[in-house]
Amino acid sequence: MSSWLDYTINGLIVGNVYALVAVGLALIFGVSRLINFAQGSIYLVGAYIGWVAVVQLHTPLPLTIIVVAVAAALVGLVIERFGLRPLQNSVRIAPLLATIGISFVLDQLVMLTFSPNPRALPSQLPDVRFQVGGGTIGPLDLLIAGVGITSALLLFVFLRYSKLGWAVRATAQDRDAAMQMGVDVNRVNQAVFGIAAALGGVSGLLVGMYYNQIDTAMSLQATLKGVVAEVVGGAGNVPGAVIGSLLLGLVESYGVAVFGTSYRNLFAFLLLVVVLVLRPNGLFASARQAPPEPLTGTFIAPSRPVRIPRWALLVAAAAFAILPLFPVSFYVLQTLINAWLLGMLALSLTLVAGTIGQVSLGHAALLAIGAYTSALLSLNFSVPVGLAIIGGGLMSAALGTALISPSFRLRGHYVSIATLAIGEIVSLVILNWESVTRGPIGISGIPPLALFGYDLISATSIYWFSFIVMVVLALLQGRLLGSHLGRSFRAIRDDDIAARAYGLSLNRYKSLAFIFGGFAAGVSGGIAAHLYSYINHETFNTQQSILALTVVILGGLGNVVGAIVGSVALVGLPEVFRIAAEYRILIYGIVLLLLVRFRPQGLLGTM
Amino acid sequence: MSNIDRRTLVKSSLAAMMAGAAFSRTAFAQSSEPILLGVSGPLTGPNAQYGTQWKQGFDLALDEIQAAGGINGRKLAYSFEDSQSDPRQSVAIAQKFVSDPRIVMELGDFSSPASMAASPIYQRGGLVQFGFTNSHPDFTKGGDFMWSTSVSQADEQPLLAAYAVKRLGLKKLAVLHLNTDWGRTSRDYFVKAAKENGAEIAVTEGYIAEERDFRSTLVRVRDANPDGLILISYYSDGALIARQARQVGLKQVICAASSVYSPKFLELGGEAVEDVHVGTRYFPEDPRPEVKKFIAGFKKKYNGQEPDAFNAYSYDAMNMAAAVIRIGGTDRRAIRDAFAKVKDVSSVIFGQATFDVESRRVKGAMNAELVVRKGQFALWDGKPT
């Protein structure tokens, strides 16, 4: 039984580590209702500034902490001033995307400056260990706990008792009213970003010292775990974030204890989904508290979509259809095949996120379900490839809708977080369900694409196949949007209370959207599986989900043509920038930021 | 904003791609051009560090090849395309290489999903895909254009098992492995070999690559009461596990696979990796001439930095590519056939490398039993730790 004490202590220790990131996220969410995906990047920057201070400048620990806090706060202020403030009057989704772009840029800058090799960040505390239960804890554990709890307490006191704190809370409750009362909203935002960034930087430093290791890949993981902890504790609730983090640490630790290490993150994300479904405002929100999301409309702002004449679309489609007849290299065709496959995913997401307003951050899971279903059907049951792909689409539609249905009652950001978690859960189930998915070994030898007994193996035939499938799906979706169904979808997005008042069943329409979207994404995954011939749990990862969302927002939410244009652009741009080698993702991030800044409603506008 | 923008955007990106293709065709006409290899690997993204290490090994080998007069008077060079270890990008790169007539052979990719997704394109395009870190047992089954010098885990793990069980006398083992295709395959071979040597496997734990906290995993290990820990890890996670094992008070012997062999393991692990045993393919004071040359050359070129396992793989791969091209010339099919003909190519990992034509892999990796002593890798002297 003493082991349980150890698992508990270990859970609290690691929860401690998560708390540092979660508190910063909670603070920002509390004020600007924004999940700051760049928080992990600030944490990364803090760790590397700390490395410079400790290893190059040999600063003592208190000075190191001050240096890191100040430098990270400056980074936070720059992000707020130049990345986010220009977006404050645009759609709510724009700052979210901007933080994703900023995190690309920051991560790449750190990688280019310091090389991607991991570095040791030596702890500057004496190496004494205290025996607790069967293990030991060191002074750094205590320091991290101290920083986490103290900062949460200080923030709590600041928000409750100081004048600027009141201003922060007033801004959080109602931005316009606060402005009318003379609150300088920009100053409030600045203060919040500065404090959150300082905290993020210091947490990167301490966690780096804790593991004696920093590397450029630590940013995304920190954001993911921080977001989970924050939402469990109640988004925007600072003390809640600390408790949510400790709870997350405990759940992970007990998960390892009972089922083994490879199930660890599964429990983290299951916890998140359960909390979201049962207590969408977090564990510590009072039942009567108003939901922190705006009820309607403002998450995705309406805009006038760009009207493209029908003949122009026909000409464009014809041009792409006859492209392989011209002497273009297979590389161009392959790049466009990737664009068409991404296009199908984007069609699916633009329906789900744009038309009915359920912004999904886990869409790669639908690809994975389709891909595995199609691969296994054709390998294990010798189903012809064409049918297997349709099977993949159907399975994705059914399973995807079933998985997401408990989250139908959620709104705005919470849908994104829930889908993010479901995406991770699907990937972890694929990793662990070895008897079916072959676990980490993956599925190899998947037969190539074939139709009616003919193998499609040349780049040209795959090009035509994927192009036609995408066009058919796009036409179907266009037809759907023009029908009464499309109008109902948009009504639910724009005002779900009004829609319900008109007698629309929200769950039924949301299911319909996910069924259609799941099918398109599943077909895309199925084609990809046969194209690659090998897939494993890493083939369809979180980055793909984020990419798909970027495509959809770039093209214009809900806009069918926009989704396809966005896919071509976001598959094409990194290829065009190949010449820039290591710098290409940096350039990509900057282009993304500029697009969000100057055309937040997307290239072709929201439909 | 009108549809003009959409079309110009599409057109400009297409134009840039076609310009690239046209450029490659004109460049091919000159024969004084270097012989070009395509490398598909991660330079950005989560695996970027390994791409950087590849480059170091390639560049060192190329310096030596150039100094020795190149290949029949022509220089050898490579074009490194960043795939981020993402299958979507590696297939595009594959088409790019296949349709670029200057490229005579391809090296990489790093991860199995990225490499094996590109295999069908290389196979159908008739361009050799030389995967020198691809230990996935099915990699070379992709076709007769897939060749690999990655040490087969069927070869490596029995060596590690013999070190742990026979030489160190460990009888009850806990195996911690990276839960990837590599870690999983390795674990299976290790467990089999260890059992054959008479050891008992107390517990095996697979962890994902992003994991940093192993305390709870180590409690499981402690409760299984093993007398040794086996790490099937890369250097960064291996160092983390060793540190946390010592912090939670586990004092058992730790024995790690060759992939932790890196100066970074010592740097990141600090005192915690003292006395960790590592089964490797070469070691710093190795008397073999090819190893001496490699280590001395590497330190000279990179300011005294010690080379690690991935540096050695890429260095060997470039030398192997040169040896193959010396026999096969610049014809893609002849190069494939030349892989079956090269004999006893000097190699850090294998000593003398010759392909097994059946499996298209190299057998008989060298073996060195090291231990960390005073913060350095040293040949194990047979003394218990």
Image (tube, coloured by chain):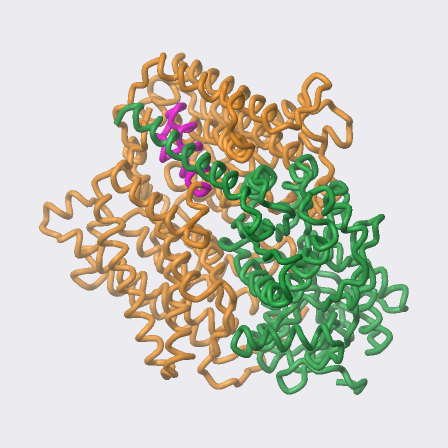
Chain colours: A orange, B green
Question: On the rendered image, what quadrant is the C terminus of chain B found in?
Answer: bottom right
In magenta, the rendered stretch is: A548-575
**How many numbered markers are drawn?**
0
Residue B242, image x and y in percent?
64, 73
Q: Main secondary structure of the magenta part?
A: helix
Q: Is residue B38 left or right of residue A408?
A: right
The correct choice, above or below, for A55 with respect to A287 in the image is below
Residue A480, image x and y in percent?
44, 16
Residue in the image at 77% along x and 26% along y:
A382
The correct choice, above or below, for A146 with respect to A229 in the image is below
The one nearer the camera, A391 or A238, is A391
Residue A151 showing in the rendered view: yes
Q: Is residue A339 left or right of residue A368?
A: left
Residue A401, image x and y in percent?
54, 29
Residue in the image at 87% along x and 64% along y:
B195
Q: Is residue B216 left or right of residue B170?
A: left
Residue A148 showing in the rendered view: no
The one nearer the camera, A24 or B286, is B286
As for residue A290 lying within the magenta part, the answer is no
The one nearer the camera, A575 or B235, is A575
Q: Quadrant of residue A147?
A: bottom left
